[in-house]
Image: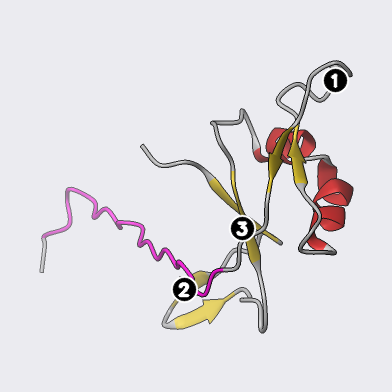
Amino acid sequence: SATPVFFFPVTMGIIEKGTISGTLPSKEAFAVHFPGYPSSISRAIETLGGIQGITEARKSISNKLELRFRPEDPYAHPALGEQRPCNGFLLKISKEDIKKPENQPAL
């Protein structure tokens, strides 16, 4: 199975009645390939040093992103991640199935 990927900032777009709501970054975005399955997005952000830690890592290409699997343990060593540029963009579009009532005939 695939490794979870988190995009920052997290934005959600919804297609409704032929129009799209939400925003896409106009210039640049970044993603974090998280090596595991966190219990929640907030826990994943916490293990990456919080928003402040992520922001510091993004300020310079030489900065490393620290992943602490146990952020509450001061003796746990971090796993370091490096930034890599990428020109690709992944967009997932999903459609919710609308269930018809059983007493209504199908067209």
Label annotation for residue 72: 1
Horizontally, residue 60 falls left or right of residue 84, namely right
Kindly identify which residue carries mark 2.
Answer: 15
Region of the chain picked out in magenta, as a range = 86-105
Amino acid on which disc 3 is placed: Ala
Look at the numbered disc 2 and give the secondary structure of its residue: strand
Distance Cα–Cα, label 1 vs label 2: 40 Å
Amino acid on which disc 1 is placed: Glu
In the depicted view, which residue is nearer to us: 95 or 59? 59
Which label sits in the foreground, 3 or 2?
3
Look at the numbered disc 1 and give the secondary structure of its residue: loop
Kindly identify which residue carries mark 3.
Answer: 31
Q: Position of residue 26 (x, y in %)?
A: 66, 84
- Residue at screen point 66% across, 69% down: 29
Distance Cα–Cα, label 3 vs label 1: 24 Å
Q: Earlier in the sequence, mark 3 or mark 2?
A: 2
Amino acid on which disc 2 is placed: Ile
Residue 75 among those drawn in magenta: no
- Residue at screen point 42% across, 83% down: 18
Q: Position of residue 62 (x, y in %)?
A: 79, 59
Q: Which colour scheme appears in the figure? A: secondary structure
Residue 89 among those drawn in magenta: yes
Q: Earlier in the sequence, mark 3 or mark 1?
A: 3
Look at the numbered disc 3 and give the secondary structure of its residue: strand
